[in-house]
Image: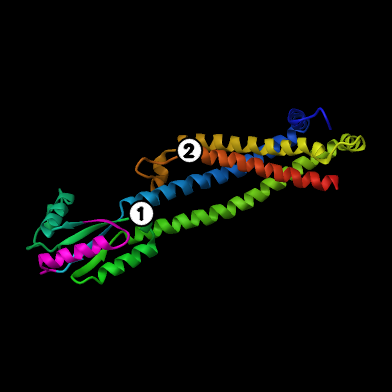
């Protein structure tokens, strides 16, 4: 219909929200709780991802050498290590320096070093691995390759730490996706029912609009905007609640997620995607309900 545009649609949607304020308030609260759970999983996922990345940046492999190797043999091992894909750098650590570092770490517990006799530690290469290899399977393959080098006695790295972080990241990722899909369907269902109630309350008005020749999209517009506004408000409220909880709780309770700079809240782009995605779900919920009503 001529003379009516987006402003009319938004105004009608606002009137619809006010006319069914109790239903829309309940819908907004329910959606807020659902999106709060999604936001919580996003915070956990992003911080875990950051922790895995930080571990990758400082991931080191200790390559222990056999006794009695010549300087040429040690240089040959060094050359092979440097040429290996995934190796950022390799630093030679003489056994005397390794013992000095151990004594420094055990300062105040010197009794543990008594009776050692000669230095029991071997020479080694401390190999820094590229962050792309911060993966349990890749690290295992790389260390197995190192262990087969001539002159290498043993190879070690933080195997358990890498595996645990990787498993946690997968669990949060797949669990978060499944939960997000479930909550997304729930949001669509809530909005569909909320808009359906609004449609029934304005049934006669809609029938009159159809009778005078109003287009389908003209009738649908306000209800679709209404559904989007309810979800956008609910999502915005959930982000606000999550921010309050995040800054109110001691970060020490989730220390295992902390990176070097501590815990991070949701970045602005992620918040924008949450609100935009919520609006899209509201649109879909309204569309489902209005299409069924007008058929």
Mark 2 crowd level (few <14, some 14–19, many ≥20, 10 Å Cα): some
Circle 1: element type = helix
Write down the residue under mark 2: 246
Whether 214 is drawn above or below 80: the answer is above
Whether 120 is drawn above or below 247: the answer is below
| Residue at the (20%, 60%) spot, across then down | 125
Q: Is residue 69 magenta?
A: yes
- Coordinates of residue 209 in the picture (x, y in percent): 88, 35
Whether 78 is drawn above or below 276: the answer is below
Q: Which mark is residue 118?
A: none
Mark 1 crowd level (few <14, some 14–19, many ≥20, 10 Å Cα): some
| Residue at the (42%, 38%) spot, across then down | 250
Considering only order in the chain, which callout, 1 or 2, is on the residue closer to the N terminus? Answer: 1
Looking at the rendering, the stretch of residues picked out in magenta corresponds to 67-90
Residue 130 picture quarter:
bottom left
Residue 187 picture quarter:
top right
Q: Is residue 174 magenta?
A: no
Q: Report whether 156 appears left or right of 221.
A: left
Residue 280 picture quarter:
top right
Q: Nearer the viewer, residue 238 or 288?
A: 288
- Coordinates of residue 40 in the picture (x, y in percent): 52, 44
Circle 2: element type = helix
Write down the residue under mark 1: 131
| Residue furthest to the left | 117
- Coordinates of residue 172 in the picture (x, y in percent): 50, 53
């Amino acid at each position: 219909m001529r003379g009516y545009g987006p402003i009319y649609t938004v105004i009608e949607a606002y009137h619809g929200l006010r006319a069914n304020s109790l239903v829309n308030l309940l819908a907004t609260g329910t959606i807020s709780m659902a999106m709060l759970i999604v936001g919580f999983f996003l915070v956990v996922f992003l911080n875990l991802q950051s922790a895995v990345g930080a571990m990758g940046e400082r991931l080191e492999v200790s390559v222990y050498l056999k006794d009695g190797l010549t300087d040429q043999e040690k240089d040959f091992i060094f050359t092979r290590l440097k040429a290996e894909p995934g190796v950022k750098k390799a630093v030679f650590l003489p056994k005397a320096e390794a013992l000095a570092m151990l004594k420094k770490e055990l300062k105040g517990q010197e009794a543990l070093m008594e009776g050692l006799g000669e230095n029991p530690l071997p020479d080694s290469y401390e190999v820094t691995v590229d962050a792309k290899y911060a993966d349990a399977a890749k690290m295992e393959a790389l260390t197995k390759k190192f262990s087969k080098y001539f002159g290498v006695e043993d190879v070690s790295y933080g195997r358990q730490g890498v595996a645990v972080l990787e498993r946690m990241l997968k669990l949060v990722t797949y669990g978060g996706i499944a939960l997000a899909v479930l909550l997304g369907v729930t949001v669509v269902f809530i909005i569909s029912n909320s808009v359906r109630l609004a449609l029934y309350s304005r049934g006669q008005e809609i029938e009159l609009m159809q009778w005078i020749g109003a287009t389908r999209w003209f009738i649908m517009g306000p209800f679709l905007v209404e559904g989007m506004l309810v979800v956008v408000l609910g999502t915005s409220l959930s982000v606000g609640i999550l921010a309050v909880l995040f800054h109110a709780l001691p970060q020490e309770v989730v220390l295992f997620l902390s990176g070097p700079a501590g815990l991070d809240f949701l970045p602005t782009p992620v918040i924008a995607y949450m609100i935009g995605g919520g609006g899209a779900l509201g649109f879909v919920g309204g569309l489902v309900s209005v299409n069924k009503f007008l058929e």
